[in-house]
Amino acid sequence: MLKFLFIAVSLFSLTGHWGVLISFLLVISFVWGLSMENFNLGIVGLAQLDLLSYLLGFLSVWITALMLMMSLSVKVSKNFPAVFSGLSVGMLFFLLMSFGTSDLIIFYISFEATLIPIFLLVMGWGYQPERVSASLYLLFYTLAASLPLLLSILWVSSEEMSLDYTFFWKARSTSVLLFWGMVLAFLVKLPVYFGHVWLPKAHVEAPVAGSMILAGVLLKLGGYGLVRVFPYLESKLSESSSLLMSVSVVGGVLASLICIRQTDCKSLVAYSSVAHMALVLLGVVTNTFLGVAGAVVIMISHGLCSSGLFSLVGMVYERLGTRSLVLIRGLISMAPISSMWWFLFSVSNMAAPPTPNLLGEIYLFIVSLGWWSGTVLLVGLLSFMAGAYNLYLFITTQHGGEISSLSLMSDFSFREHIVLFFHMGPFILLFPFLSHFFS
């Protein structure tokens, strides 16, 4: 712990509030992580505190600290650093509110309020002029899908005389409109295939920090919402489960096929998020302990792994000025140490042992065996395709002859190695913790 605190406090050398904020978030995250096995389950007033809330709260604080560390160029270039850090902290506040409340109205307000900071981050610090259309896609897709959620919440509050979803057990029946009204917003936020169009656009045009927080935490709001509402919508879930499972596995396979034909690193990682979130939907729809456990494991591990991959892509883009797989070749000869990180994050993203992704997929395989044999084949195909597009990303970027105009790429700085280490360290440590907790 003392070594960690020394690293965190050393960030005070970054002048101004930036280093103070990063150090504070890192120390809070570390203390949060150490106390994870000793937290108390339960509901206190409007606060909902259980393992899922605790894990996602930790992930939110941790990724926010890392995105600020990764965005030091914003401070150095004096590109409105106070506004940037303020938006990051505001987004963290709304995320913690979403993950820590049992009141549906507070959850809905926080759920929607997270759109404002990410919208402004994409608009203000995005790379290309297309960031305007990308941010509008992000805004209107999620707002349009969440309007039925608000109407459903208001209807439930009038029927049950309560906004606490823990009282939904008293509901005698659930209409089809209520079911899809509650679920649609979370499916688009996840996002499920066919409702994913906004995600690649937002990722490609967002700054590195925006992609990190979007893939690392914001997508998990969709999975979190489904985990919360599905147990209380069980009567209609059993009728719609076949449709949702079909959409999840078929959409995941299609997203994986799209990954293999991508020529933009960032777009490839973005579509891989769609494929991974398909597994999350599959696990949650089963509404079983192992299925939900597998979904939670994949959500947490994907949050760290995808954020690390976007960090890697951003580091290369800052040096070479391109994300094209046609041009980014031979990095292993130009920056051999960085190739180690590319390898670690690529194999982690494909669920190689001993990563927690593997644990989550094993749980989903077990659940699929009890559902339908065809589901097992599709989940196996998803795992195979994950290996294919991650190997494609690694081999294409690291091997082959480098382009002469790009052959002077420098290796990563100490700060960048620390950012990547802080992604990979908790990612590996999650495996023994989660396997012990869910065993």
Image (cartoon, grey):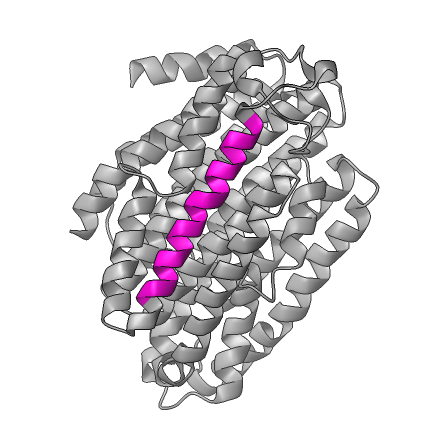
Left or right placement of residue 280 versus residue 316 in this view: left
The residue segment tinted magenta is: 376-397
Of the pair 396 and 353, the residue shown nearer to us = 396
- Snapshot quadrant of residue 263: top right
Looking at the figure, which quarter contains the N terminus?
top left
Residue 67 shows in this picture: no
Whether residue 75 appears in magenta in the rendering, the answer is no
From this viewpoint, is residue 179 visible?
Answer: yes
Q: Nearer the viewer, residue 71 or 112?
A: 71
Q: Main secondary structure of the magenta part?
A: helix
Q: Is residue 405 above or below residue 125?
A: above
Q: Residue at 23%, 40% (x, y): give it.
A: 433
- Looking at the image, which residue is at 35% across and 35% down? 427
Where residue 311 sits: x, y (%)? 56, 30
Residue 396 forms part of the magenta stretch? yes
User: Residue at image x 58%, y 23%?
Assistant: 400
Residue 176 vertical position relative to residue 288 in the rendered view, above or below: below
Residue 350 placed where, x, y %? Answer: 40, 42
Q: Residue 293: x, y in percent? A: 28, 57
Q: Nearer the viewer, residue 319 or 110?
A: 319
Among all residues in the image, which is located at the extreme front?
401
Percent from the top left, x then y, of residue 87? Answer: 65, 39
- Residue that lies at the very extreme toward the right in this rendered image: 129
Q: Is residue 181 above or below residue 39?
A: below
Closest to the observer: 360 or 48?
360
Find residue 330 and report its image quarter.
top right
